[in-house]
Amino acid sequence: MSTKLKIIMAVVLAIIVAGGYITYNQIQSKKKVKPIIKTATVKKGTVTNAVTATGTLQPLTTVSVKSNVGGQVIKLNVVEGMKVKMGDVIALIDPSDSKSAYNQAAADMDSANAKIRQAQLQANAQPALTDANQEQARHSLDSAQAALDQLNNANIPQRQAAAKQALDQAIADLNVAQKESDRQHELFNSGYTPEKTVQTADAQLIQAQGQVDSARKKFDTLNSEIEGDREAAQSRVLQAQDALNQAIANGYQNQTSSDNVVTAKAAATRSKAALDNAKTNLDYCTIIAPRDGVVIKKYVEEGGMVAAGKASGGATGPGISIVDIADISHMYATVNVDETDIGKIKVGQKVDVSVDAYSSDVFFGQVTKIAPQTVVTQNVTTIPVTVQVDSVDERLLTGMNATCNFIIDQKKNVIAVPNEAVKSDSTGSYVQVLVGDVPTRRTIEVGMAGDAKTEVISGLAVDEKVITSIVDPSKIKPGAAAGATGTPPGLSGGGGRPPGR
């Protein structure tokens, strides 16, 4: 082969190799995948800073309804979840034993009344008093007259003065109790005293008011009482005169007959008390709702037996609950707030409340109480905070998990972007705006940084697209989530939250 031919073949071979290399590079270049860019549209919205804590919903108050008498439940009118009004019949207890006791007491009352009539007839039928009782009758007359004179001359002024003094003292005690109640309420509202102390002061105030009412009633009715006492004393004088007359005529047996009348009346009084008690126990067989509310739990079924809830009808003990009635007119949640955040919480502060069952809905509430003492659990210090839900919503049930967001700061109707879109470096804050398909750095001025969004004061317009993340597919390991962020060529890689967060 000639040298010239060899040179031609070498040139052709070089051209083929070069062409293959170029073709290979072009094929490999076409195989490259574009970066994955995630964006968010710039909108006007609300930027919020909040402290979040969780707890469970509880009713405002719950009462346990028990029976004051023991027996079988022959009727149960409620089920769990039913609304009841105060006075509604909850259950009926078998009244057989109570009715028997009532009938027996009624019979005893009839017998006592018959004995009164018999004693009165005997007193009226007594023979005339004998001459032997005349002196005693005269002495009784003198004593009755002396008592009447003492009542008119000394006793009445003393009683009037004592009643006035008692009323003045009761009013003074009421003023002291009122001032103490007001002071305790002010301390409670400022969070310096527990609710139990306030309740004690209020109870003392109520007691003092009752003492004033009682003293005033006694003072107002004193004249009537005095007149009654005077009439009674005058009546005793007349009775003594009558007794003297009767003693002169018939002797002392009329007095004995009068005593028998008094004894019979006392027995009738005891019988009346027993009858009233039996009637009360019979009424207890009908269990009524003591308040408005919702039955959240029932403990017995029809046919079951219950014990008396207090000493009544011969039974004692704590008794068995029939139902629990909850006041759900307002719900509240007690949540534990971290000690580092408690300085941001105050009584009356607005709270957004959400529950797992209705995660898309927000219920509004406010802080009603901040506990005066911390709770330490596994070396974490928290403070219990009570949040009351403002509105009544039948969807809210006792025991639901509640998330409370305590609004610390909030700006509405401002241009806002997701926090992850905002970057910062030595030159300030910026975002990456998608112009066409090209990420472009845009310097911005940020305002308030919230929990999820950041306010943009200047540098962005509504409906622009800001980049929240850029992922290089070549760096994604097989099976890994495409969530890593990157920086396109030509942009600085500074990152982080905007100043002021």
Image (cartoon, grey):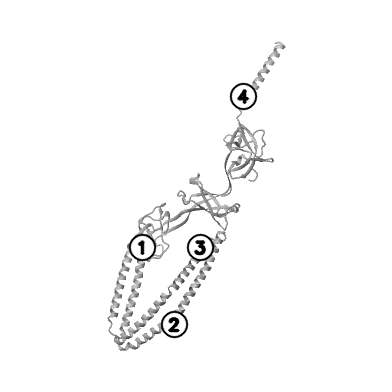
Q: Tell me which label, 2 or 4, sits earlier in the chain.
A: 4
Rounded to the nearest angstrom, the CA distance separating label 4 from label 3 is 86 Å
Residue 122 left/right relative to 207: left
Q: Which mark is residue 283?
A: 1
Under circle 3, the secondary element is: helix
Task: Describe residue 427's horizontal placement relative to residue 79 as left or right.
Answer: right
Instruction: Answer whether labels 1 and 2 touch (C-beta < 8 Å).
Output: no
> Disc 1 vs disc 2: which is toward the camera?
2
Vertical comparison of 239 with 483: above or below: below
Instruction: Tell me which label, 3 or 1, sits earlier in the chain.
Output: 3
Instruction: Confirm or deny contact between disc 4 and disc 3 (CB under 8 A).
Output: no
Tag 4: amino acid: Ile
Q: CA distance from mark 3 to mark 2?
A: 47 Å
Mark 2 is surrounded, within 10 Å at the Cα level, by few (under 14), some (14 to 19) or many (20 or more) other residues, namely: few
**Viewer-proximal residue among 45 and 106:** 45
Query: Residue at 46% across / 79% down in the picture?
Result: 157
Which residue was labeled with disc 3? 199
Q: Nearer the viewer, mark 3 or mark 2?
A: 2
Observer-side mark, 4 or 3, equals: 3
**Lower sequence index among marks 4 and 3:** 4
| Three-letter residue code for mark 3 | Gln
> Residue 325 at x, y = what percent?
43, 56
Q: Position of residue 411 (x, y in %)?
A: 58, 46
